[in-house]
Structures are given as structure tokens and as C-alpha cells.
Image (cartoon, rainbow, N blue to C red):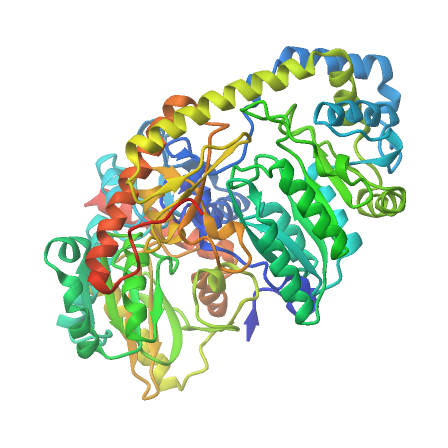
């Protein structure tokens, strides 16, 4: 069979542009090494023309953040009838907004830390600032404040004392107009990648200093990883089961990653569902794949072939 | 267990602060054309006569190619050093070509001087705010920076004296005073003549060596070029010059002018760092200064930046809330803006880039002590006047909106949003 022509999409104007470019470069190199014809595309106002005229068999989405993970590019690719990697537009839209996906999990009985969502509109026009005391009464301390949309831990702030809450809100609101204030769960950070409905070995994340923030994520060596995570088998299985449930609940396909924290009782609390998992040197999905025995290139190829298979099978119906 | 860096245990202690940063990642977006970037510090080289540079380069290769493509000496080409002394003369400083060491831009001069003088923990006094590239060099050698505030006339001598006294009484001494006395980056102010003398007196009383960094001396909007510190006290001052703002940053030609003992050691350090400056770019720079009307070129840059600066100031006046403040820059490339205390310019940057598509440098970058949260630097040398107008307008809108948001979140108990003077 002819090797497919793959458009690797990365960059764009998202705040995670730099991380995305790194993911895209690695994926493109790996696919080329495996014999694919690869075209690297940045996301700008020429994208639709480039996609429509490029003669691509598959688009590999190495995009992170807005317009890459929120369903917008997925919707466009569906219009252009170009098969693409990762969850479809609807699943992406559901997973992208943390208040939506946490709501889904919560309704389905999956554990996710209790949260309150606050919008800048509520703060500006409804006087929600006066309700912050109640938020703390309701959730307790410490808290985590995060933008409702976006990844890479950007804008995420840990709040240990009530006086720090307003500043954390201002910081998180700079990334998105809605923020989540979430109960902080102490425990082991774990990321579970799911490929084609099956969970890979959970990866345990141990930042050497402080928290798993942006710097700990993207500085080589600032974090140690264990794959599989050093947890009892029963807990590992639980993590995998929840990751698959989270994947299915949003209607994901091909690949997604669920981040969770396992508390002292062994309960995995789901934090977020990432539909365009990072593929950089410090990213979690490639580590999980390696623990499964797949080299990076093989992982990329599997994802591309899932997208092609899906396209072929839907074409035969 | 898996660490992503097998060399982790091997790195020198001085690299500990070198980590990935959210702000740096945001600038990857700021460099896209969709974003109006007032963040960088780039001269507008489009204003250069590239045909003339091409002719000069061809002349160098044709006339002296075997020299230009060969290794050179550690001190730099003598013929270039003679021309650089002419540049210094235009700035009001007299040096002998033997006193100069050519470096890869002013930045390498700062690196080599810090390497020459600073052991880990040594104290360097610097203006607050100070040039971010210098702070980076100081931090790479684990020097500790103590900031001294400025006002409209630059570094405040009384504050400098207090700082030096406080250091002395805690049993410490500062080794160096790092200063950008003309059109300072980022604050845009110049040290007055009276203060130049006071600062040098203090340097003498407390035995400080002064590093005078003068990249913007000739980019002067008011015709008030002050005598460089080195002309007032040559034995106290190591002078750093550069062609980056008056010719080209890509040519990477800077220099140090200093007394012989310092200069001799710098040559050894330069050789250890990179053997020698590129002969090719040195020869191009030499021919540029020798055969082209280089001072007219400086005047062209100066006029261009002065106009753009005026555009920026007019738009700041029109678009920024009254609780913000700034000083008209005396020259250089930057305006320094203060926003109310409750607004954190670092926290605001993501929204500036993603919503308003405008970028600036948050004030915190210019301090090592956590200062500058309510300050920010705007560049006016690179963007067109239309882009500057639009960028400042967007930023003003954003700052007004952020003030409202901070008010809504904190209520009456919050930080002051009234704003103060330009400090």
C-alpha cells in the first residue's frame, strides 16, 4: 500500500504554540523516518487553502490549546473531508472545557474534585467577588484555581490561604473568561493514555521541586516519571478503567489522555481529559507508549493508521 | 524511575535557575505577525541602506578577503578599534584604540566583565529596573544584584549611598555598579550631569568599579548628550559600547574600553571564550565606519525613533487610564509604563496576547528582587507608527478592563488602583 501523505499541523496562535511546535516537529520527523510523505503546516489564515489543495490522506493534529483542541479545526477538517487524528469535533468540544467534562464525569458517577466555576461576567456584573468567602466555606482549603479552558498548566495557581484566592483568580482569568476553583486533592499524580479504547500503563509524575507546573513540565529533568506508576495493581486497574470510561463518555476515538490524582485511599480523582496529548520529549503519552513497548515512531504510526482505518471503513459503508 | 535528563546530576550549580518559563512560551506567539509586538528591542534595520552594506561587504571580500576569512587576534582588529574610538568621541568619550577589546555585541562584554570580576555571591549594584540581558549575565555567574531606584534624573545618589551603607553595615561590599546612564533600558531616563559626578564620588568612596553600558548614547531625542562616566573618571569605569543600535545588531560588534590591567585580562577571557571576534564582520564594520556617512545613518535612526516615540506617547495619553503613568523617554528604544498596584503586568500578558493580540515585556523581567509587577516596557523602535498606535490603543483598553476586574474581585479591600507618579 502507498505510504500516506500526512499533513502535520502544529503551532497556531494558541498560547501553547511553542509546545505544539515541539510536538509537531517530533511527530513529523518520526513519520518521515517511517516512510510517510509529510508536510508540516503552521496554523494561519492560509490553512484551509493549504489543506484543500494539499492532497493529504490524513491530518495529524499536534495542536495544543485553543483552535486545536476545542473542536474548531476538527470541524473544518470534517467539512474538507480530510481524515484526522484524535477525537472528533464533538468529543473535542466536550473535553476542552473543564467545567463541561467535569460535569459529565460527575453525572456519570466518576470521581472528580468538587469545584465552583466563576466567570469574569459573574464577577464584574453580578458581584460574585462577594461570594468568595462562601466558595472557601464550600470547598475548604487548599484550592486549585485554573482556567476552564487551556492546557500545559498555564494559569493554574495553588491557593493555600484565603487571601491568595483573588490574585489567583485574576491570573487564571487572564487565560480564559471562566475559571474553576477546585478542591485540592493531595496524592500521586498519574496520567493515563488511551489508544483506540485501550489504556496504556499509567505514568506517575513526581516533580523534584514544588508542583507539576509549566516549568516542571517542560524543563528536562525537573520531573521524574515512573511507568507504570508505583501503585498497587488494583489501583492501576482502577485508574485504567476510569481513563477508558472518561474516553468513552466524551465519545473519544484514536487517542486521549486523562490526568488524575490518586488519593491516600487509592481513589483516582479525574482532573482533565486531553484530546491532543503532548508529543514532546517531556510528554506523557510517549512515555506510556514506551512502557507498552512501542517506540515513538510506532506510536505516531499507530495513531495515523487509526485515522486512516476509520476513514477507509466509513468510506465502505 | 525515569528522568528525562540523564545529565541532571552533572550540571553546574549556576544553571539551577535555567528552567522553562510560561512567559517565554507566550513570546512564541508574540512573534507571529498577527500580534503587534511592542515587546522586543529590535532596531529597525529596514532604515539601513542595505545596498551600501552590500558594497562595503563586497569591497572587504575583494580587497582583503584572505584576512577577513582568517582567524584574528583576541583584542580585535586594530583598524576597527580606531574607528570605534571615533564613535566614542561622538558620544563624548576619548579612548585610545589600545584600550579597546572588541566583543560579540555588548552582551559578550557584559558576560566577560562579570566573569572577570564576580565570584558566586558577589554583589553588583544595578538600577531598578535594569537591562534584562545584564541581569541574565550576572545570574549566570551567581552574582547577587541589589537594585537602586531611579527618578526622572536617573539613578538616585542618596538611594545609592543608603544601599552602600546598608551593605557595609551588614558586612558586605559591592564590587560593581552596573549602569546604563543614557536613555536607560527599560526606564527611558538619563542620569543628569550633577548626578554623574555624585555617583562617581560614591563609587570612589566605596571602591566600586563602574560598568557603564552605553548602547543608546547617540539615540538622543533632545540634543542633550551628557559626558559619559568614563570621560569623568577613566580609572573607575569600564565602558561598554556597541554598534547594534547605530549600525546593525546582526553584525555583532561591541567593545569594552578599560584600563590596561582590565583590558589585558579581558583579551585572555575573550580568547578562552571564542578565540577571536569574526574578522569578516569586524572588517565590514570598519569599512562602514571608514567609508560611509555613518553618523547620518545614526541621525536617520534617531529621527525615526523620535517620531515613533511621539506617536506612542500621544496614544498612551489618549488610551491609557489616568491611573497609569510614564515619562517621555529622553532617547533610546523604550517607554516604561506604570499601571496601578493591583494590576500585575505578568499575569495580564496571556490576555494581552490571546485576546488583544498585543505584546509587551512585563516589568518583573527587569528586577531580580520580584519588583516591577505593576510596570511594563514598550518598544517603539521596530513597529510602524500605525502598529504602535493600534497596539497601544489595544493595551490601554485591556489595562482599563483589568482595573475593573481587579476591583470586582477584590472589592474595597483590594490593592490600590489609584496609581502613583512615575516613580
Q: Is residue B323 left or right of residue A203?
A: left
Residue B83 location in percent, x, y?
80, 22
Residue B136 location in percent, x, y?
62, 51
Q: Is residue B405 left or right of residue B11?
A: left
In this rendered view, identify the residue nearer to me: A65 or B304. Answer: B304
In this rendered view, identify the residue nearer to me: B353 or B419. Answer: B419
In this rendered view, identify the residue nearer to me: A108 or A140. Answer: A140
> Where, by quadrant of the figure, is residue B360 drawn?
top left
Instruction: Classify A152 as above or below B382.
Output: below
Residue A29 location in percent, x, y?
53, 45
Which residue lies at the image location 62% right of the left edge and 13% below the top edge? Answer: B49
> Where, by quadrant of the figure, is residue A119 drawn?
bottom left
> Where, by quadrant of the figure, is residue A144 drawn?
bottom left
Judged from this view, the residue extending furthest toward the bottom is A265
Instruction: Classify A116 as above or below B88.
Output: below
Q: Mark yes or no: residue A45 visible.
A: no
Which residue lies at the image location 70% right of the left edge and 36% below the top edge? Answer: B105
Q: Is residue A147 left or right of residue B247?
A: left
In this rendered view, identify the residue nearer to me: B278 or B421. Answer: B421
Residue B362 location in percent, x, y?
44, 48
Q: Mark yes or no: residue A89 visible.
A: yes
Which residue lies at the image location 37% right of the left edge and 35% below the top edge? Answer: A56
Q: In this view, does A88 lie to the left or right of B189?
A: left
Q: Quadrant of the N terminus of chain B?
A: bottom right
Amino acid at each position: 500500500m502507498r505510504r500516506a501523505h500526512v499533513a502535520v499541523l502544529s503551532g497556531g496562535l494558541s498560547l501553547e504554540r511553542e509546545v505544539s511546535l515541539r510536538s509537531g516537529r517530533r511527530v513529523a520527523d518520526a513519520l518521515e523516518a517511517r516512510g510517510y510523505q509529510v508536510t508540516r503546516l503552521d496554523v494561519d489564515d492560509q490553512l484551509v487553502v493549504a489543506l484543500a489543495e494539499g492532497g493529504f490522506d490524513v491530518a495529524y493534529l499536534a495542536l495544543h490549546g485553543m483552535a486545536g483542541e476545542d473542536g474548531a479545526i476538527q470541524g473544518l477538517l470534517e467539512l474538507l473531508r480530510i481524515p484526522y487524528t484524535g477525537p472528533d469535533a464533538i468529543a473535542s468540544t466536550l473535553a476542552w472545557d473543564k467545567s463541561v467534562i467535569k460535569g459529565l464525569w460527575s453525572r456519570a458517577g466518576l470521581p472528580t474534585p468538587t469545584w465552583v466555576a466563576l466567570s469574569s461576567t459573574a464577577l464584574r456584573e453580578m458581584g460574585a467577588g462577594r461570594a468568595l468567602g462562601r466558595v472557601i466555606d464550600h470547598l475548604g482549603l487548599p484550592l486549585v484555581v485554573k482556567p476552564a479552558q487551556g492546557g500545559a498548566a498555564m494559569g493554574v495557581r495553588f491557593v493555600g490561604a484565603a487571601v491568595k484566592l483573588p490574585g489567583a483568580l485574576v491570573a487564571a482569568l487572564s487565560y480564559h473568561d471562566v475559571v474553576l476553583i477546585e478542591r485540592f486533592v493531595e496524592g500521586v499524580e498519574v496520567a493515563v493514555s488511551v489508544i483506540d479504547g485501550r489504556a496504556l500503563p499509567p505514568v506517575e509524575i513526581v516533580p523534584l521541586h514544588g508542583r507539576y507546573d509549566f516549568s516542571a513540565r517542560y524543563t528536562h529533568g525537573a520531573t521524574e516519571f515512573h511507568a507504570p506508576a508505583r501503585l498497587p495493581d488494583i489501583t492501576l486497574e482502577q485508574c485504567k478503567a476510569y481513563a477508558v470510561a472518561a474516553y468513552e463518555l466524551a465519545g473519544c476515538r484514536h487517542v486521549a489522555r486523562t490526568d488524575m490524582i490518586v488519593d491516600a485511599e487509592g481513589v483516582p480523582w479525574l482532573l482533565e481529559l486531553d484530546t491532543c496529548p503532548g508529543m514532546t520529549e517531556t510528554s506523557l503519552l510517549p512515555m506510556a507508549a514506551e512502557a507498552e513497548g512501542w517506540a515513538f515512531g510506532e506510536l505516531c504510526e499507530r495513531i495515523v493508521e487509526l485515522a486512516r482505518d476509520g476513514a477507509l471503513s466509513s468510506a465502505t459503508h | 524511575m525515569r528522568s528525562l535528563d540523564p545529565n541532571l546530576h552533572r550540571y553546574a550549580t549556576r544553571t539551577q535557575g535555567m528552567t522553562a518559563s510560561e512567559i517565554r512560551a507566550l513570546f512564541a506567539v508574540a512573534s507571529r505577525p498577527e500580534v503587534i509586538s511592542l515587546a522586543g528591542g529590535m532596531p529597525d534595520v529596514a532604515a539601513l541602506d542595505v545596498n551600501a552594506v552590500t558594497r562595503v561587504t563586497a569591497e572587504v571580500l575583494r580587497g582583503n578577503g584572505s584576512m577577513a576569512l582568517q582567524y584574528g587576534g583576541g583584542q580585535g582588529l586594530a583598524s576597527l578599534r580606531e574607528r570605534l574610538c571615533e564613535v566614542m568621541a561622538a558620544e563624548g568619550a576619548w579612548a585610545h584604540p589600545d584600550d579597546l577589546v572588541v566583543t560579540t555585541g555588548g552582551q559578550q562584554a557584559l558576560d566577560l566583565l562579570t566573569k572577570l570580576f564576580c565570584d558566586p555571591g558577589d554583589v553588583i549594584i544595578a538600577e531598578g529596573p535594569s537591562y534584562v540581558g545584564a541581569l541574565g549575565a550576572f545570574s549566570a555567574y551567581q552574582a547577587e544584584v541589589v537594585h537602586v531606584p531611579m527618578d526622572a534624573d536617573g539613578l538616585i545618589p542618596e538611594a545609592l549611598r543608603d544601599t552602600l551603607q546598608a551593605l557595609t553595615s551588614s558586612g558586605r561590599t559591592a564590587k560593581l555598579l552596573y549602569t546604563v546612564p543614557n536613555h536607560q533600558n527599560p526606564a527611558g531616563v538619563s542620569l543628569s550631569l550633577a548626578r554623574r559626578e555624585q555617583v562617581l564620588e560614591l563609587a570612589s568612596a566605596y571602591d566600586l568599579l563602574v560598568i557603564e553600558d552605553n548602547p543608546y548614547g547617540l539615540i538622543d531625542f533632545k540634543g542633550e548628550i551628557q559626558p559619559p562616566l568614563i570621560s569623568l573618571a577613566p580609572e573607575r569605569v569600564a565602558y561598554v559600547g556597541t554598534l547594534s543600535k547605530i549600525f546593525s545588531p546582526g553584525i555583532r560588534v561591541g567593545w569594552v574600553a578599560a584600563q590596561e590591567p582590565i583590558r589585558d585580562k579581558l583579551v585572555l577571557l575573550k580568547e578562552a571564550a571564542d578565540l577571536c571576534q569574526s574578522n569578516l564582520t569586524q572588517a565590514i564594520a570598519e569599512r562602514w565606519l571608514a567609508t560611509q556617512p555613518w553618523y547620518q545613518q545614526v541621525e536617520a535612526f534617531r529621527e525615526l525613533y523620535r517620531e515613533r516615540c511621539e506617536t506612542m506617547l500621544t496614544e498612551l495619553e489618549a488610551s491609557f487610564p489616568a491611573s497609569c503613568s510614564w515619562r517621555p523617554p529622553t532617547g533610546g528604544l523604550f517607554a516604561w509604563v506604570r499601571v496601578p498596584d493591583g494590576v500585575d503586568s505578568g499575569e495580564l500578558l496571556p490576555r494581552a496576547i490571546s485576546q488583544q493580540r498585543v505584546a509587551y515585556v512585563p516589568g518583573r523581567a527587569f528586577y531580580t528582587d520580584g519588583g516591577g509587577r505593576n510596570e511594563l516596557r514598550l518598544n517603539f523602535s521596530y513597529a510602524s507608527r500605525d502598529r504602535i498606535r493600534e497596539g497601544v490603543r489595544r493595551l490601554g483598553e485591556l489595562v482599563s478592563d483589568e482595573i475593573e476586574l481587579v476591583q470586582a474581585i477584590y472589592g474595597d479591600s483590594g490593592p490600590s488602583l489609584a496609581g502613583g507618579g512615575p516613580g
